[in-house]
Image (cartoon, rainbow, N blue to C red):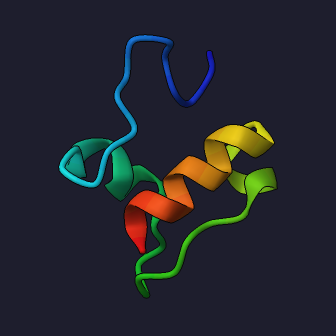
Amino acid sequence: MPPIESGDQIDYKNMSLISRFISEQGKILSRRVNRLTLKQQRLITIAIK
């Protein structure tokens, strides 16, 4: 099962989605841990920052 479904909106307002990709310390998890594509990881990083 992919971590982000095709219908999920990667947006800074979608905190339920973003919180899955942040560690307990508030750091962004790596692509290997998240199992995201490069494009998805970039969009998540932009939404978090």
Name the residue nearer the viewer: 6 or 46: 46
- Residue 21 against residue 28 in the figure, above or below: above
Q: Position of residue 33 (x, y in %)?
A: 72, 54
- Residue 31 against residue 46 in the figure, above or below: above
* Quarter of the image that includes the C terminus: bottom left
Q: Position of residue 2 (x, y in %)?
A: 62, 21
Q: Position of residue 45 (x, y in %)?
A: 54, 63
Q: Dividing the picture into quarters, in which one does residue 37 lie? A: top right
* Quarter of the image that includes the N terminus: top right
Q: Is residue 28 left or right of residue 10?
A: right
Q: Position of residue 30 (x, y in %)?
A: 72, 64
Residue ranking furthest to the bottom: 25
Name the residue nearer the viewer: 37 or 19: 37
Q: Is residue 15 left or right of residue 31?
A: left
Q: Dividing the picture into quarters, in which one does residue 16 lie? A: top left
Name the residue nearer the viewer: 3 or 10: 10
- Residue 37 against residue 4 in the figure, above or below: below
Q: Is residue 32 left or right of residue 47?
A: right
Q: Is residue 29 left or right of residue 23?
A: right
Q: Residue at x 78, y 44 (%)?
A: 38
Q: Residue at x 51, y 27 (%)?
A: 4
The mark total stands at 0
Q: Residue at x 41, y 78 (%)?
A: 24
Q: Residue at x 81, y 53 (%)?
A: 32
